[in-house]
Amino acid sequence: MEKTWNNKAWFLVLPVLVLVAFSAVIPLMTVVNYSVQDTFGNNQFFWAGTEWFEELLGSSRFWQAMGRNLVFSAIILAIEVPLGILIALNMPKKGWGVPVCLVLMALPLLVPWNVVGTIWQVFGRSDIGLFGYYLNKLGFNYNYVQDPIDAWFTVIIMDVWHWTSLVVLLCYAGLVSIPDAFYQAAKIDGASRWAVFRYIQLPKMQRVLLIAVLLRFMDSFMIYTEPFVVTGGGPGNSTTFLSIDLVKMALGQFDLGPAAAMSLVYFLIILLLSWVFYTVMTNYDAER
Amino acid sequence: MARIDLDHIRHSYLPNPQKETDFALKEVHHTFQDGGAYALLGPSGCGKTTLLNIISGLLHPSHGKLLFNGHDVTNLSTQERNIAQVFQFPVIYDTMTVYDNLAFPLRNRGVPEADVDRKVRETLDMIDLADWAKRKARGLTADQKQKISLGRGLVRSDVNAILFDEPLTVIDPHMKWVLRSQLKQLHRRFGYTMVYVTHDQTEALTFADQVVVMYDGGIVQIGTPAELFERPKHTFVGYFIGSPGMNVLPVEVEGKTARFGSLAIVLPGAPEKTEGSMELGIRPEYVRLGRVGIGVSISKVEDVGRHKVVRAKMEGREIAAIVGEDEEIPAEPKLRFEPAGINVYADSWRVEMRA
């Protein structure tokens, strides 16, 4: 068959190109534009070159926020992944318990993020909050408004409450796809409970776990709404994560140039990490 | 290896079985001899997997006892019964090498590593996978994976029996034949007690010394392939085994004559029982097509290679006959039943005939 060579097909992809241009590329370019300029208001811009980037990478404020972010992600992954696996392993595989458990698990995921923040903001208050009030009654000196450790504790518990379900549901999906014959064969082979987990369940969950870790890492690295509502980044700067810092800089101080530079660096970090994950995942697939 | 006695075993998946129909497995009372190769043959849902799982201990029977070499094992767990089972879909431990897969059941039982190594190497040779020992098991083909599943059973020298649950379902047709003959060889060399569940008659008839035909939760006949072919005890066995299955005609019996419509067929003897609904069964292999006998009209001829299957209408009823590849089909075809191939059934069960 003779192939027709012309460029008319470009018109077919044009709508999506336009859409992506307006929704992503052009806004991003304005950010790039701000990041290399300085402004004193009144719509006057001056060329700043790489000044904002140098300032950012040399500022302890940025690295501290980044450090907090990494520590936060590490802690919630270390809690949510094992806890999610543990819950998924203990969920019923058949019977009336299945829909009940699934609905219970899905509930936290359905709550809007700022509502989650508000819930925990009230829940944790030491004067009227159920959680905070009784912790103090029990003798713990808990006050997330004043104590950085209590603030971290609250933010972490909140994230675990909100997102462990996601890990559970993904793991559960992996687990129910294992045919009964595997468990029966393991019984016949005399495998211990641990061996069943290590050699049957874990390998079958590996893929979904990788996705769960990726999603949870990226989400937690970009976390904004919940800690903003609960602690507002405080006390002091103790729960000021990158995104909170960014908003403070861009909207609070209206430092457009430094904020744009920070957005770009932030964006590149997430892009880099996603690429690493993507490579690991596709390599893993190729190996199969 | 062990002799397996099924002592009045029945099973129901319902908590309180009342009626006969509540039982997925109706009463089975049978012995699998030590070192025998048995096939459980029957259509899907006839209870054959239920029976197998009762033997392996994955299911506990609602009634009856199970004995290995005379010892009651009914209440023992799967591990304690010491059996091996190969499932429909290959079960392998993906992340382990072929070697570690075979070593797994031994290591779980705390066997010293030196013995593990010796047994695993022996087994690798038996299943022809010695060259693959260091490979990760997940990259293998379905038939190699199935061999690993089998190998995990063979590696334990003390297994009481090896059970197969339709093990060739996911294997490519040309490999099925190879695997089946390898199984057969293993059986001959090492004398394992093997029970093989299948719905494929070729598999059952080529694998087993004794075939147990199951239908609707019960055993209808146990016999050698030849017995099942020549003397099917139940019309179901007649239909189910053979290709095409046995012709079954409703008849009225008077002495040594069976009347089918206006036709009278001479029987080799007088049936011992003549009450109930009587049927005459004859395999297509014993229906002769020629110039003498009962006039029929031919509706279809299927050439299946080695022979032809002739579908004919006799007194308005479909009947199949097998004729040789080179045989002529006469213009005015007539049918004749060879007396040696005639069986008579009362209420679907075979009755003996007195000469």
Image (cartoon, coloured by chain):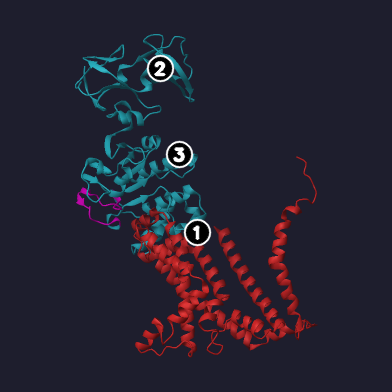
CA gap, disc 3 and disc 1:
27 Å
CA gap, disc 2 and disc 3:
36 Å
Residue drawn at x 33%, y 32% is: B225
Q: Tell which subunit mark 2 falls on.
A: B
The residue lying toward the viewer, choosing from B228 and A201, is: A201
| Callout 2 crowding tier (Cα within 10 Å): few <14, some 14–19, many ≥20 | some
Residue B65 in the magenta stretch? The answer is: yes
Q: Amino acid at mark 3?
A: Trp
**Residue A281 position in % (x across, y down):** 57, 63
Which mark is nearer the camera, 3 or 1?
Answer: 3
Q: Amino acid at mark 1?
A: Lys
Q: Quadrant of the C terminus of chain B?
A: top left
Residue drawn at x 43%, y 66% is: A105
In the image, which residues are magenta?
Answer: B55-78
Q: Amino acid at mark 2?
A: Lys
Q: Which residue is mark 2?
A: B313
User: Looking at the image, is mark 2 or mark 1 earlier in the sequence?
Assistant: 1
Mark drawn on residue A195? none
The chain coloured cyan in the image: B
